[in-house]
Image (cartoon, rainbow, N blue to C red):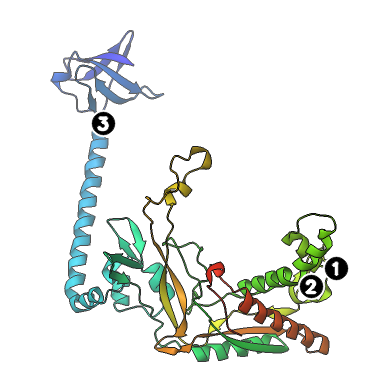
């Protein structure tokens, strides 16, 4: 609405429009606003919400809003002062420890983590749970606005996360894990298989970084989940045994085979269904769970964690939608390296000792038939891990085990 500002003899301001008068309350109006035309807003109860003086485009704000803004600014200043004071006291108290962390080139820097001061005072030194260190106490680069666990500049290492598993006993953990499996199954068979190259599990999981790694949430150590192992072995059996049969069957009709057709063929095999289970389309005509139990696989000794690099060259091209593509993939694009963590093939502190993972299979009944199923599953497990690999990037050599 448009109106003129008036001031009566009692010093009360009002905004006059034809046949209407509005009384703005809480605005910092002065005599210089008298007789000025203005644009203003009102609510359903005829309360003035805002005023803009037409001649100068001066926008008047209610005093209550100005007061609230000033109070918020003062509160933010107080919080910032408290933060600086807390940071100063923390640095003075733990100066030696913070200097040692900075000189170590470890990406873990306690003072740069996004945790409360009380938590920092509790942690102090390098955390002995690597899951906590990597994901909850990540280093944040304020200039780039991103979390980092590895960084180089001009070919020189600036920071690299250093694994710390504390006093965790890997061999004892494998023994305990095997004992628990024996308590759940009638027959249990462990298999220790060395890593034949680097291992990458959980690369695409949600993470504060652009890449991730599967770590046990309690122990903080790398491991291979049972669901991943069972899925890899099942996929291997379908591809290696039933896909060829499907090719032979479909060659007569001239159609291209698919993994879906191979899976349907596998579900008609009793041994396959007894090991992995099946749904209503299987030979049992009903949903059944597999008789073989797959357990998590843990490293038998302390693993070596190594940083590797992915180097996508045409990120600008791939980030565009095909219909809107304006950038062609060419050699003048700058590659953007993406670091990711891998499990190395040697144990920590012993370059000549290969790292082994303990795989455990079990079965709930101890009969001759069930023992044969367990033996068959073990054969498939070894074949899958040695010939297909497990985890990410198996196509370029990661994730293979030695028989």
Q: Is residue 220 visible?
A: no
The numbered dot on residue 62 is 3
Residue 280: % across, % down: 82, 63
Q: Quadrant of the C terminus?
A: bottom right
- Secondary element at image label 2: helix
Looking at the image, do the residues carrying marks 2 and 1 touch, with CB atoms under 8 Å apart?
A: yes
Residue 368: % across, % down: 82, 89
Q: Give the mark nearest the N terminus, 2 or 3.
A: 3
Mark 3 nearby-residue class (10 Å; few <14, some 14–19, many ≥20): some
Query: Which circle, 3 or 1, is nearer the viewer?
Result: 1
Query: Which circle, 2 or 3, is nearer the viewer?
Result: 2
Residue 158: % across, % down: 27, 69
Residue 377 figure quarter: bottom right
Rendered residue at 19%/28% (across/down): 28
Against 11, residue 211 (above or below) is: below
Is 185 on the left-hand or right-hand side of 335? Answer: right
* Residue holding disc 1: 283
Q: CA distance from mark 2 to mark 1?
A: 8 Å
Q: Give the mark nearest the N terminus, 3 or 1.
A: 3
Residue extending farthest to the left is: 32
Rendered residue at 80%/76% (across/down): 271
- Secondary element at image label 1: loop
* Residue holding disc 2: 273
Is 244 on the left-hand or right-hand side of 210? Answer: right
Q: Give the mark nearest the N terminus, 2 or 1.
A: 2
Rendered residue at 30%/79% (across/down): 125
Is 378 on the left-hand or right-hand side of 320? Answer: right
Mark 2 nearby-residue class (10 Å; few <14, some 14–19, many ≥20): many
The numbered dot on residue 149 is none
Against 180, residue 220 (above or below) is: above
């Amino acid at each position: 609405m448009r109106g003129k500002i008036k001031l009566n003899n009692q010093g009360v301001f009002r905004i006059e429009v034809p046949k209407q008068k509005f009384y703005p309350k809480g605005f910092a109006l002065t005599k210089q606003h008298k007789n000025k035309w203005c644009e203003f807003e009102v609510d359903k109860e005829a309360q003035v919400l805002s005023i803009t003086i037409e001649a100068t485009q001066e926008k008047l704000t209610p005093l209550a809003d100005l007061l609230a803004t000033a109070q918020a600014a003062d509160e933010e200043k107080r919080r910032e002062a408290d933060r600086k004071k807390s940071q100063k006291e923390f640095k003075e108290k733990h100066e030696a420890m913070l200097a040692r962390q900075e000189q170590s080139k470890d990406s873990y820097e306690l003072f740069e983590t996004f945790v409360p001061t009380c938590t920092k005072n509790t942690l102090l030194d390098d955390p002995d749970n690597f899951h906590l260190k990597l994901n909850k106490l990540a280093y944040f680069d304020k200039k780039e606005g991103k979390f980092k666990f590895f960084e180089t500049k001009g070919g020189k290492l600036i920071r690299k996360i250093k694994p710390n598993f504390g006093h965790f006993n890997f061999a004892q953990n494998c023994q305990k894990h095997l004992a628990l499996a024996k308590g759940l199954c009638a027959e249990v068979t462990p298999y220790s298989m060395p890593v034949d190259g680097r291992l990458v599990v959980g690369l695409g999981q949600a993470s504060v970084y652009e890449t991730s790694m599967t770590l046990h949430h309690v122990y903080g150590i790398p491991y291979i989940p049972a669901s991943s192992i069972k899925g890899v072995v099942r996929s291997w059996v379908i591809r290696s045994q039933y896909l060829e049969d499907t090719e032979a069957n479909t060659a007569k009709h001239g159609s291209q085979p698919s993994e879906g057709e191979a899976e349907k063929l596998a579900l008609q095999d009793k041994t396959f269904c007894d090991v992995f289970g099946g749904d209503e389309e299987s030979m049992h005509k009903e949903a059944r769970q597999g008789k073989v139990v797959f357990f998590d696989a843990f490293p038998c000794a302390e693993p070596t964690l190594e940083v590797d690099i992915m180097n996508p060259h045409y990120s600008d091209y791939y980030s565009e939608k095909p219909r809107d593509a304006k950038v062609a993939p060419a050699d003048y694009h700058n590659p953007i390296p993406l670091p990711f963590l891998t499990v190395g093939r040697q144990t920590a502190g012993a370059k000549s000792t290969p790292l082994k993972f303990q795989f455990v299979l079990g079965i709930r009944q101890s009969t001759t038939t069930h023992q044969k199923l367990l033996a068959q599953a073990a054969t498939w497990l070894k074949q899958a891990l040695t010939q297909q690999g497990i985890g990410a990037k198996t196509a370029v050599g990661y994730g293979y085990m030695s028989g």
